[in-house]
Amino acid sequence: MDFEVCPGLPIQMSSKSIPPDNDRLDRIVAEARRNREQRNRTYREQALRIYPWICGRCAREFNHTNVQLLTVHHRDHNHDNNPANGSNWELLCVYCHENEHSRYLDNAGGGNSSGNVETTQATHNPFANLKTLLKDKE
Ligand SMILES: [Zn+2]
Ligand SMILES: [Zn+2]
């Protein structure tokens, strides 16, 4: 391909042209996405080759008619960690897989919000009434 700028090109032409960077970026992004999808397909296929088609949690068995419900879980939750021996993979059905991830989020998020509940009792102020009573007297 020859994209060399012709030295004889009139100046107006170049001011009209769209910067090619956006186009190139789009291509790069699209390619990265394609690579990722390809890799995802690959590790799934590998995992399905290595392991029996059984959910690691509920032990449900799968065959060619419903294998799309069997997903590859990453034990360390790092989808980029795909050792060829499959040590980071676990086959889970979609339900157990979802379960596994929400469990992980619960643990990681520290959803312990019951720390400062006891202060709600203090919202009723017994002296609020007294104050108005005193005011009425004055
Ligand atoms: Zn399952
Ligand atoms: Zn997973």
Image: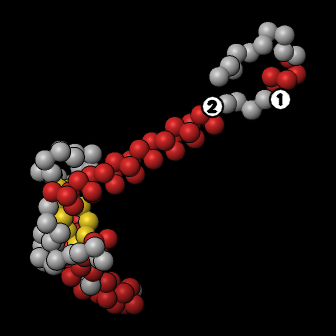
Which mark identifies residue 16? 1
The label on residue 21 is: 2
Q: Tell me if residue 15 comes above or below residue 54 in the rendering.
A: above
Which residue is rendered at x = 74% and y = 32% of the image? Answer: 18
Q: Please, is residue 25 above or below residue 7 in the view?
A: below
Residues under numbered marks 2 and 1 in contact, where contact means CB atoms less than 8 Å apart: no
Taking depth in this image into account, of 41 and 106 the one nearest to the observer is 41
User: What amino acid does circle 2 point to?
Assistant: Asp
Label 1 packing within 10 angstroms: few (<14), some (14-19), many (20+): few
Q: Residues within 10 Å of mark 2 (few under 14, many from 20)?
A: few
Q: CA distance from mark 2 to mark 1?
A: 15 Å
Tell me the residue at 70%/15% (across/down).
4
Identify which residue, 52 or 99, lies in the foreground: 52
Measured as percent of width and height from the top left, residue 1 is found at 65, 22
Residue 131 image-quadrant placement? bottom left
- Residue 46 vertical position relative to residue 27 in the rendered view, above or below: below
Q: Quadrant of residue 13?
A: top right
